[in-house]
Amino acid sequence: MNATKRIVVKEEVWAALSSMREPRMTYSELIEQMIEHEKKRSLVEDIKRIQEREELVEIPL
C-alpha cells in the first residue's frame, strides 16, 4: 500500500532539505537516500567499534 503521510517541519528544516534535493527529486526520494546513508554510516561505526573491542581471527575458507 502506497499511502501518503504528512509531517510537520520547521521552516529552516524545509529550507535545508530543499537545498539538498537534486533536480526532479521528490522529498520522499531524498529522505530514502538519507535513511540509506545513515544505515551505512551506522554499520561502519558498529564494525569499527567491534574491531576496537575484539581480537578478530581470520577464518580460512
Image: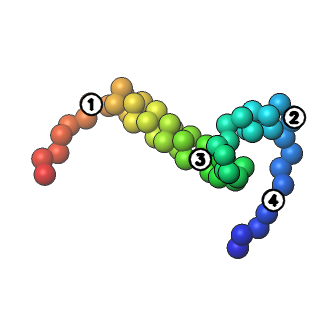
Please name which of the two marks, 1 or 2, marks the residue nearer to the observer. 2
Q: Is residue 52 left or right of residue 42?
A: left
Q: What residue type is labelled 4?
A: Lys
Please name which of the two marks, 4 or 2, marks the residue nearer to the observer. 2
Structural distance between the alpha carbons of marks 2 and 3: 21 Å
Q: Which amino acid does label 3 sit on?
A: Gln
Please name which of the two marks, 4 or 1, marks the residue nearer to the observer. 4
Q: For the residues labelled 1 and 3, say whether their Cβ atoms are less than 8 Å apart.
A: no
Residue beneath disc 2: 11
Residue beneath disc 1: 55
Q: Residue at x 59, y 47 (%)?
A: 33
Q: For the residues labelled 3 and 4, say whether their Cβ atoms are less than 8 Å apart.
A: no
Disc 3 residue crowd, few under 14, some 14–19, many 20+, Cα 10 Å: few
Relative to 39, residue 16 above or below: above
Which element type, helix, strand or loop, lies under badge 4? loop
Residue beneath disc 3: 33
User: What number is the disc on residue 5?
Assistant: 4
4 or 2: tag closer to the N-terminus: 4
Disc 1 residue crowd, few under 14, some 14–19, many 20+, Cα 10 Å: few
Q: At which x and y percent is residue 12?
A: 83, 31
Q: Which of 14 and 58 is in front in this view?
A: 14
3 or 4: tag closer to the N-terminus: 4
Q: What residue type is labelled 2?
A: Glu
